Image (tube, rainbow, N blue to C red):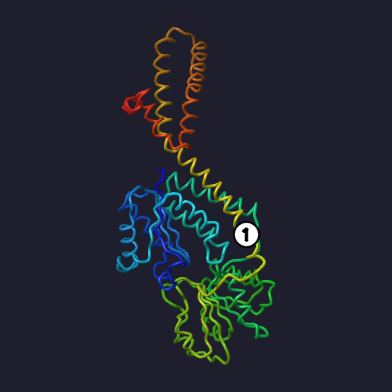
Amino acid sequence: MHNNFKILGLSFRNTPIETREKLALDEENAKKLLKFIGDFTEANDVLILSTCNRTEIYYNHENDYSKEILQGIALLKKMDVDTISQHFELFDKHNEAIFHLFEVSMGLRAQVVGDLQISNQVKRAYQWSADENMAGPFLHRLMHTIFYTNKRVVQETSFRDGAASVSYAAKDLIEDITAEFQEPKILVLGVGEIGQDVCRNFVGSRFSDVTITNRTESKGRMLAAECNFKFVPFDDVEHAIANADVVISSIAKEKAFITKELVSKLDILSFKFFIDLSVPRSVEMSVEEVPGALVYNIDDIQSKASEALDKRMSAIPAVKVIIEEAVAEFNDWSKEMIVSPTIKKLKNALEEIRKEELSRYVKDASSKESKIIDKVTKSMMQKVMKLPVLQLKAACKRGEAETLIDILNDLFDLEKQSEKLSK
């Protein structure tokens, strides 16, 4: 369980969006990959985190299962495994992998620092692992430590203050590109998590002419009513695109929805802006070949210099201190898990001795006397156990647990006792 956590992954830092979108894993494919890993490797505590910015597979085992995992991705994506392997990098140092997952989960490694969406994405990834029975005690404890750390970050720092996120950065971008427009007409296409955030960020802004469309009409209408925006049925989407100055697309599809062919049919008199927040992309880059059409994808959205973002940047040192404290606490627990089997064996061995001695000496005792003797001997056993347990836990922190485990095994012949009890 200890010192075997690894990451096989890629991110926006070293992989272009063209590659990320090809290797992105939705829920169905992530669960298929979890099952594949469970069937073809001995890896445990597997977490698959796939967002617009990264695809990362975390797992716990002393062996390197990169080859098998990449083969699973290649099968799912119907791609050549050698091509895929060029983009993925293995991080096999336990502590680095732990810190990385904490920093990703807090938003420190997001494209827009402190992006609020990552917390929910990590929770979903954890749920998928639990659904496929790929989350063991190590991952359960790690994820709950991360969730508690996130709560501390919110309560104790200004890192999550304001609305600096991909959706907020998109709003800032639209502010810039529509500066010349009196009242730009905006169409939000798709109301998944990011589409909802975009709409809510528009509330109370100078953007009042906002229209929403969505395949699931009830969901789109509900958001439109909440934000006091217009709604058009998805069947009228081409007409809505034609009327809009800015089209924000966050549709989850394998192939682009807004194509050059579709945009070529539009009568673009000045400029029409397409903001593509989807991965895989939902707007073809060739759309820009149509006069007046400009496309911005998620990699074009840069962190805007805002008060909220400045606060977040200044809070990073405090966030890192909280993460360091949480990782240290988690590592202490993780180390203690090494000695848990020995503690259990020692307890069982002492209990067996206690029961054997009781059976020899309390045959003629009354019921009242038996209860007193049972209570006293249990108390004695607990006191005898206390010091070895404390010493084992202290040895864990010093990195000397193995030596003490060997001593206790020899002193109490724990392996033999364990075999005896299992018969």
Q: Residue at x 68, y 85 (%)?
A: 182
Residue situated in front as seen by the camera: 321 or 143: 321
Residue situated furthest top in the rendering? 364
Image x and y of residue 268, in percent = 55, 90
User: Which residue is found at the position 65% from the left and 85% from the top?
Assistant: 181
Image location (x, y in percent) of residue 95: 45, 49
| Apparent side of residue 112 relative to residue 63 in the rendered image (left or right) | right
Secondary element under disc 1, as helix, strand or loop, is: loop
Determine whether, in the image, residue 158 is placed left or right of residue 72: right
Name the image quarter holding the N terminus.
top left
Q: Position of residue 312 (x, y in %)?
A: 62, 61
Q: Is residue 331 above or below residue 8?
A: above
The residue wearing badge 1 is: 160
Query: Image point 54% across, 76% down: which residue?
Result: 189
The residue nearer to you, when weighing 305 against 186, is 305
Picture quadrant of residue 220: bottom right
Residue at 60% from the left image edge and 80% from the top image edge: 186
**Residue 8 lies in quadrant:** bottom left
**Placement of 214 over or under 260, stated as above or below:** above
Q: Position of residue 204 (x, y in %)?
A: 69, 72
